[in-house]
């Protein structure tokens, strides 16, 4: 005999993507459990940029406001804590979370985001999200056309150095690990980028870099690429297809945010290396709508 699941949908991850998905489902009178560990990727960022109507706002405020919006709906259950396992069962899915709790639902949305692996450079992690960042669209404008350092981590850093020359005068600190052929060198030179090969020794002050050859310079901002990996192994536990991108691992989703596993949807950074709050909200909205329609029109 099959029982009615505890919830229509369980959403793992209640930040921007998960909250946007939840809002659509709650407004369709669905019973939604949001499980959230409360560790957003932009936890260290004082001001979030580029999300229309919210430009420059503290990203923690955005997350709090999103939760307040959801709490206006009576079919929401919110659980603070981490989900640890998820598997398919006769009722849909069973998820364990928190202190040994478990819940079932007909559908699952994964919105857990990703973790960044930062380059191991003294002083970098402490400044991450403030004077050191990855995305020029989020943090480039604040450099006010000043001197910008791009710390190379691999071949993809070339694109970052080229792009950032739109926001200021770039020193490309290749650390000798970014291959640059003649065409790349000429292109960088045409964009006014200075190439420096000595490894970065440390970052101090607001954004002062000392190289291994003892060269020191103050910058308006420092940019570097990170490697991303899913914040949890729950997508892997469920058998969702994953993809290796130039920036790291993401979960494969179709245009309606469905994964390769029936009944499991995904949204936000977990499903794309194009990270932004607005993209997470947009894809979360699609995931919420698509999940609802999969309940209304089961295949
Ligand atoms: C340094 C930095 C600066 C940034 N600046 C900007 C900016 O200015 N503007 C902008 O638009 N974007 C910016 N971003 C990108 C932005 O932070 C992300 O695109 C956005 O946070 C993605 O939202 P998300 O909901 O997918 O994931 P997240 O916001 O990372 O949220 C994931 C949520 O899932 C939870 N979770 C994870 N695992 C579990 C689990 N097992 N159980 C329960 N919950 C779990 C986490 O605790 C978290 O609450 C920045 C990113 C970084 C790293």
Image: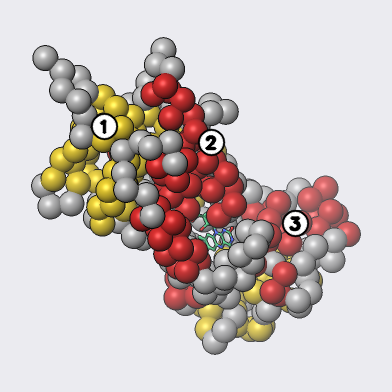
Q: In the rendered view, would you say 71 is above or below 253?
A: below
* Label disc, if present, on residue 163 of the rendered structure: 3
* Label disc, if present, on residue 237 of the rendered structure: none
- Mark 3 and mark 1 in contact? Answer it, CB < 8 Å: no
Secondary structure under tag 2 reads helix
- Tell me: is circle 2 under 8 Å from ligand 1: no
Q: In the rendered view, would you say 158 is above or below 266?
A: below
In this image, 113 relative to 171: left or right?
A: left
Instruction: Give the position of the N terminus as an image quadrant.
Output: top left
Sort mark 2 into few (<14), some (14-19) or many (20+) by Cα contacts within 10 Å.
many
Which residue lies under the disc numbered 2?
286
Give coordinates of residue 188: x percent, y percent.
Answer: 81, 58
Q: In the rendered view, would you say 146 is above or below 111?
A: below
**Between disc 2 and disc 1, whose residue precedes?**
1
Instruction: Give the position of the C terminus as an image quadrant.
Output: top left
* Residue 86 in view, yes or no: no
Which residue lies under the disc numbered 1?
105
Quarter of image, res 68: bottom left
In whole angstroms, how far apart are the C-alphas of marks 3 and 1? 44 Å
Give coordinates of residue 264: x percent, y percent.
Answer: 37, 29
In whole angstroms, how far apart are the C-alphas of marks 3 and 2? 30 Å
Front residue of this view, candidates 97 and 41: 97
């Amino acid at each position: 005999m099959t029982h009615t699941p505890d919830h229509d949908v369980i959403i793992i991850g209640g930040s921007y993507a998960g909250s946007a998905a939840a809002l659509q489902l709650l407004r369709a009178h669905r019973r939604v459990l949001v499980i959230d560990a409360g560790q957003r990727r932009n936890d260290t960022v004082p001001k979030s940029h580029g999300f229309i109507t919210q430009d420059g706002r503290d990203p923690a405020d955005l997350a709090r406001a999103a939760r307040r919006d959801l709490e206006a709906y009576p079919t929401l259950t919110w659980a603070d804590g981490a989900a640890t396992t998820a598997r398919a069962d006769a009722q849909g899915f069973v998820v364990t979370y928190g202190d040994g709790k478990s819940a079932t639902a007909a559908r699952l949305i994964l919105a857990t985001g990703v973790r960044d692996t930062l380059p191991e450079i003294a002083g970098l992690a402490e400044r991450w999200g403030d004077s050191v960042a990855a995305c020029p669209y989020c943090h480039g404008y604040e450099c006010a056309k000043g001197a910008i350092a791009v710390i190379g981590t691999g071949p993809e850093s070339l694109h970052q150095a080229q792009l950032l020359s739109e926001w200021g005068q770039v020193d490309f600190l290749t650390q000798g690990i970014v291959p640059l052929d003649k065409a790349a060198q000429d292109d960088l030179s045409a964009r006014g980028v200075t190439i420096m090969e000595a490894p970065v020794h440390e970052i101090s002050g607001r954004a002062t870099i000392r190289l291994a050859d003892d060269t020191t310079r103050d910058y308006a901002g420092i940019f570097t690429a990170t490697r991303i990996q899913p914040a949890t192994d729950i997508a892997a536990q469920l058998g969702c297809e994953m993809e290796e991108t130039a920036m790291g691992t993401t979960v494969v989703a179709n245009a309606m945010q469905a994964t390769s596993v029936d009944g499991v949807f995904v949204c936000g950074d977990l499903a794309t290396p194009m990270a932004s709050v607005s993209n997470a909200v947009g894809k979360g909205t699609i995931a919420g709508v698509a999940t609802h329609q999969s309940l209304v029109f089961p295949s």
